[in-house]
Image (cartoon, rainbow, N blue to C red):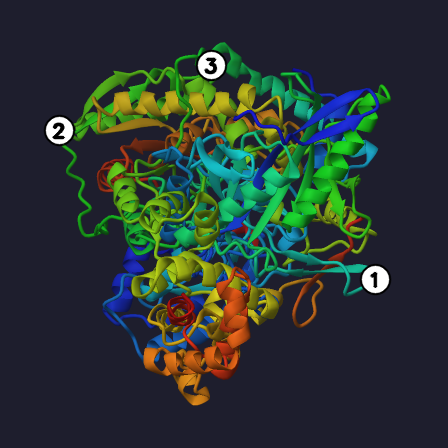
């Protein structure tokens, strides 16, 4: 059999179900790739032994009616996995072993999959290049010393390098879609509330959503199907019937209307991105879709609003990391306050500290109205913009990122420049709506760029269908020369 | 506010000062499980055995609200004659402390579940209405134990996450006595409703006391100090007295009162500033994004209202008319639901006047003696009723009844059994009494003639003689009647 | 709105993060730039807009008053950096 690790998840599942490959062989193949990697640093914890045991157990008693039978899957190290270290990319949780399992990963395991390893990410999901992880930078398989994007950088990197057949990440401001764009893979952020947040290390509660990261849209539909479900342990979980996204996937999108928002055509946007965007438009037209110009007037205020709301919530969510109940505790400090201050100073990296301070500031007395309250009002405006547009269109097409992957270290000292990576993705989180990034083509450096499709709340099926149709026409192929094994 | 004479004033060197007091009472909600987690709330459990992953704030944990706690808050609000807000929001109150695992407390800030209300106090000078500002739900914190180790603090999170109702009064209280009445009334209402057991020793009820002073006649409020976490009414009163005096002394010597948080030192009986508290407690409140706004259906409120038990004030009015009690008596008998229930059970089956006297007199005395509550009394309501019946029907005299009661309060025996076994039945057979009386008259001819010629006091002598011969069991009324007749 | 060192120090105290002078300097300049960026929001008029109260159009779900958790002391304490069989142990607060 030709390299199984290069195949799509859907194809692998088909082969397992047809008994043309055993889980053990499948798992061994991925472990081989993981062990051969010398440069990417996409894994924080490898679970090869556990995975092999699970694979063998599966083969002895295969449950072939599941969605992900016998499939090894590595997950972003933000999902609490029982008995397996969960670090959130931070020194603070370097040795933290949860005795509970996140709902999302449990859902995957219930569908026949098992844990292959924990993937590197920006610390506490704060970053756009996987350069803030305590466990070191991650490289993008497309070229040495390029960033994979973030915060789900390890996930995107491992996926693109065939170290895992599929994976899951979290997206708070673009942390699934932006790395997908940078690595030439597919990433979906579902409607807020569709995927449970229980057991996921929280960054910004009103924005965080777990989502699938895969090689193809078909795979994405399959993973999403396995992930979703009402969770009564999460008060923000939506109670609705599960959909069969993969079964109902179709490329017939005739008659749909897609909007092109003028505000996304930003100053200084590269010609390559514009070309790919226009190409996407054309593909949709050829598929029988009507293209409409729309306006989302508050778009430019999304990023500043995000950099108030997200740090504010984060500053509160990260207050629990105090060295008392779990995680790192500083050995310095003669009293409780000193212990706190040292623990949090030593345990958190720079970006996390920056965001906690911003968040603390914007919530503090005298500033709440001018910052936090104002940002929440702007958020309402952004949501209104989308609501208005969705009266006229079924989905919206935009670029995923303003550029392709940059070099490690290139933007590290310029926070604003780093934040601008999220300019196209952030409005989606603020409005709580779903969006998917698919590879659109290559830029002049042969680095991938993504197109983003934004959908109505809970309209994932339609979004996936549109993405499926476009993906087919674009027919993006990426052949990487596995430089990371040398 | 009614104008009354018994005002509580501080006599300063330079004039008379009035104390203005507001109370923030923290009442632990009676419920099986915590506000946002399914751990038990039972008092006295082994440390950290009633703690879930949510209570100890592990990564990825999320709150889910307890429906019953919401109902309890609504009930309490209705009991305070307060407005129930159909829309309210849960906010995070952010600060750091060892017994606050999340680094924030889930509380309610600008949009509490209950708005303005009022309760009426029955004071010696008359009744007084005290305004309620609001009531909101919030999480309790765990316990920090400082005295088990010289350099370390031990943390027990059993209490972390238990539902609290914070009840904020308007600054309408003017004296330690009013505070006493207020807390007792609040406690009584909640116990009637079953929303808080009001057990201050177990910490179910605590208060932060806000105290300021102003010259009599001044309409403006002075700078107030908050005395935190006072857990008994006695300490509240002492703290207020000390603090008011302290503030008056400061102001009269030309200094200012600093707005600050203070603690009441129960050993030294004084308040002192809390040195370590952050310069400004900047709680950075914001709506908790893990929860959605709480929107209540008016039908729910109506349903709960219909299901409310009779509250102390209504019961008091009813007792006055129905059971012919004075306001003072009614107050006492409705002060605790258990007492009012007991009283009503007794009067169902026996004479009201005797019932109230016996309950407020002998029964209460025996409860105080043994330091037990009425529900633990060996003298159950039916036994009490039986005893009173025996008196009304003449089986025993009131005096004998006291003897019977002495036995009942120890053994819990039926009064009828005691009377029988001790042969305490009253002698009420007129013939038998006549025989005794005839003999006494015969044996005391001189006294009889003295009585008949005007020495009316001698009547008591004859009664005494009858009692002596009958062993105290003669029916006093019959004795009186027969004697009067025979001595005409 | 300028961010100065004094404000950074105050906020770091609120957030319980100790910072040395060098860190304070770099954070002051970082945060100043970030806040300048954030201040774009002042361009947009939001007087008549209600702040977003909830991203979901769902009622707050509640649960029944049942005891179905706790009694897992070992699990609760096992990850703590300092504990004994019954308690979490922390350095004393100076009251």
Q: In which quarter of the view is residue A390 placed?
A: top left
Q: Nearer the viewer, residue B296 or B328?
A: B328
Q: Residues within 10 Å of mark 1 (few under 14, many from 20)?
A: few
Q: Marks 1 and 2, how far apart in space?
A: 76 Å
Q: Residues within 10 Å of mark 3 (few under 14, many from 20)?
A: few
Q: Are marks 1 and 2 in contact (CB under 8 Å)?
A: no
List x then y, in percent, for residue A334: 83, 52
Q: Residue A255, which numbered label?
A: 2
- Using residue C64 as the reference point, say whether residue B182 is left or right of it: right
Which of the chains bears the disc numbered 3? A
- Using residue B33 as the reference point, say whether residue B457 is left or right of it: right
- Using residue B449 as the reference point, say whether residue A462 is left or right of it: left
Residue with the mark numbered 1: B150
Residue B106 position (above or below residue C82): above
Residue with the mark numbered 3: A267
Q: What residue sits 46% from the left and 63% below the top?
A: B358
Q: Nearer the viewer, residue B466 or B36?
A: B466
- Using residue C45 as the reference point, say whether residue B176 is left or right of it: right
Q: Secondary structure at mark 1?
A: loop
List x then y, in percent, for residue B154: 71, 61
Q: Nearer the viewer, residue B155 or B33?
A: B33
- Label whose residue precedes the other's in the sequence (2 or 3): 2
């Amino acid at each position: 059999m030709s390299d199984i690790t290069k195949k799509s998840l859907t194809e692998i599942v088909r082969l397992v179900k047809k008994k043309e490959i055993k889980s053990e062989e499948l798992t061994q193949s991925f472990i081989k790739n993981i062990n051969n990697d010398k440069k990417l640093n996409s894994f924080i914890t490898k679970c090869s032994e556990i995975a092999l045991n699970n694979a063998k157990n599966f083969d002895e008693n295969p449950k072939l009616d599941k969605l992900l039978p016998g499939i090894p899957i590595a997950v972003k190290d933000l999902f609490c996995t029982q008995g397996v270290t969960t670090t959130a990319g931070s020194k603070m949780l370097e040795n933290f072993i949860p005795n509970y399992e996140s709902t999302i990963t449990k859902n995957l395991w219930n569908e026949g999959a098992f844990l292959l390893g924990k993937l590197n990410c920006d610390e506490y999901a704060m970053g756009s290049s996987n350069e803030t992880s305590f466990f070191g930078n991650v490289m993008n398989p497309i070229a040495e010393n390029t960033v994979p994007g973030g915060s789900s950088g390890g996930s995107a990197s491992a996926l693109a390098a065939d170290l895992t057949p599929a994976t899951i990440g979290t997206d708070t401001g673009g942390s699934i879609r932006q790395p997908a764009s940078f690595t030439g893979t597919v990433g979906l952020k579902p409607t807020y509330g569709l995927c449970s947040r229980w057991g996921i290390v929280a960054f910004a509660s009103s924005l965080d959503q777990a989502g699938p990261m895969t090689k193809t849209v078909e795979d994405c539909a399959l993973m999403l199907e396995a992930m979703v479900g009402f969770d009564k342990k999460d008060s923000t979980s939506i109670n609705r019937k599960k959909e069969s996204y993969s079964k109902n996937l179709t490329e017939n999108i005739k008659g749909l209307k897609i909007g092109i928002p003028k505000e996304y055509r930003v100053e200084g946007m590269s010609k390559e991105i514009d070309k790919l965007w226009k190409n996407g438009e054309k593909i949709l037209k050829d598929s029988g879709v009507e293209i409409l110009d729309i306006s989302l007037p508050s778009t430019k205020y999304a990023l500043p609003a995000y950099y108030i709301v997200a740090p504010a919530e984060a500053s509160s969510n990260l207050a629990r990391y105090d060295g008392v109940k779990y995680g790192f505790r500083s050995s310095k400090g003669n009293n409780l306050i000193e212990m706190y201050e040292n623990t949090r100073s030593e345990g958190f990296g720079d970006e996390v500290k920056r965001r906690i301070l911003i968040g603390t500031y914007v919530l503090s007395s005298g500033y709440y109205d001018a910052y936090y309250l104002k940002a929440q009002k702007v958020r309402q405006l952004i949501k209104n913009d989308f609501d208005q547009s969705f009266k006229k269109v079924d989905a919206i097409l935009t670029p995923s990122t303003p550029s392709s992957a940059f070099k490690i270290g290139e933007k590290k000292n310029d926070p604003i420049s780093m934040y601008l990576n999220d300019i196209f993705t952030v409005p989606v989180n603020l409005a709580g709506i779903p969006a998917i990034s698919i590879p659109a083509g290559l830029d002049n450096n042969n680095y991938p760029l993504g197109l983003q499709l934004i959908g109505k709340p809970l309209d994932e099926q339609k979004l996936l269908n549109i993405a499926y149709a476009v993906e087919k026409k674009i027919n993006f192929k990426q052949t990487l020369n596995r430089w990371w094994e040398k | 506010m009614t104008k009354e004479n018994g005002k509580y004033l501080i006599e300063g060197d330079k004039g008379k000062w009035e104390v203005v007091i507001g109370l923030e009472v923290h009442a632990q909600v009676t419920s099986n499980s915590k506000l946002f987690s399914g751990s038990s709330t039972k008092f006295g459990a082994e440390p950290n055995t009633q703690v879930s992953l949510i209570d100890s704030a592990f990564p990825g944990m999320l709150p889910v609200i307890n429906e019953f706690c919401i109902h309890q808050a609504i009930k309490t609000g209705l009991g305070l004659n307060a407005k129930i807000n159909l829309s309210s929001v849960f906010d995070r109150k952010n600060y750091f402390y060892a017994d606050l695992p999340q680094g924030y407390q889930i509380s309610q800030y600008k949009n509490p579940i209950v708005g303005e209300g009022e309760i009426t106090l029955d004071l010696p000078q008359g009744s007084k209405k005290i305004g309620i500002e609001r009531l909101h739900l919030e999480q309790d914190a765990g316990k920090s134990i400082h005295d088990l180790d010289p350099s370390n603090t031990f943390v027990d999170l059993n209490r972390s996450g238990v539902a609290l109702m914070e009840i904020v009064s308007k600054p309408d209280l003017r004296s330690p006595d009013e505070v006493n009445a207020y807390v007792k009334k609040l406690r009584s209402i909640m116990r009637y409703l079953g929303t808080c057991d009001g057990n201050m020793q177990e910490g179910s009820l605590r208060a932060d006391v806000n105290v300021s002073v102003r010259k009599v006649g001044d309409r403006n409020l002075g700078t107030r100090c908050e005395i935190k976490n006072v857990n008994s009414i006695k300490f509240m009163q002492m703290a207020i007295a000390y603090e008011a005096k302290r503030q008056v002394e400061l102001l009269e010597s030309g200094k200012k009162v600093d707005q600050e948080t203070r603690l009441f030192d129960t050993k030294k009986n004084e308040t002192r500033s809390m040195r370590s508290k952050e310069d400004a407690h900047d709680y950075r409140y914001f709506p908790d994004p893990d929860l959605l706004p709480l929107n209540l259906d008016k039908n729910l409120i109506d349903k709960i209202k219909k299901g409310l038990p009779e509250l102390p004030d209504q019961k008091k009015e009813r007792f006055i008319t129905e059971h012919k009690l004075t306001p003072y008596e009614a107050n006492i008998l409705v002060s605790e639901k258990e007492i009012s229930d007991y009283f009503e059970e007794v009067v169902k089956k026996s004479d009201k006047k005797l019932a109230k006297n016996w309950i407020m007199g002998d029964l209460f005395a025996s409860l105080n003696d043994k330091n037990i509550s009425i529900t633990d009394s060996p003298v159950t309501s039916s036994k009490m009723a039986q005893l009173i019946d025996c008196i009304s029907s003449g089986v025993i005299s009131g005096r004998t009844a006291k003897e019977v009661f002495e036995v009942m309060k120890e053994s819990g025996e039926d009064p009828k059994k005691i009377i029988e076994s001790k042969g305490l039945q009253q002698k009420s057979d007129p013939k038998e009494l006549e025989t005794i009386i005839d003999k006494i008259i015969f044996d005391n001819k001189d006294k009889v003639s003295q009585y008949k010629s005007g020495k009316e006091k001698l009547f008591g002598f004859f009664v005494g003689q009858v009692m002596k011969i009958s062993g105290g069991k003669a029916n006093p009324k019959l004795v009186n009647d027969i004697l009067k007749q025979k001595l005409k | 709105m300028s961010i100065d060192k004094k404000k950074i120090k105050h906020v770091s105290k609120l957030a319980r993060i100790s910072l040395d002078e060098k860190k304070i300097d770099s954070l002051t300049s970082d945060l100043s730039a970030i806040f300048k960026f954030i201040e774009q929001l002042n361009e947009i008029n939001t007087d008549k807009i209600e702040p977003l109260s909830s991203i979901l159009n769902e009622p707050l779900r509640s649960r029944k008053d049942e005891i179905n958790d706790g009694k897992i002391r070992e699990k609760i304490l096992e990850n703590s950096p300092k504990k004994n069989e019954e308690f979490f142990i922390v350095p004393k607060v100076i009251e």
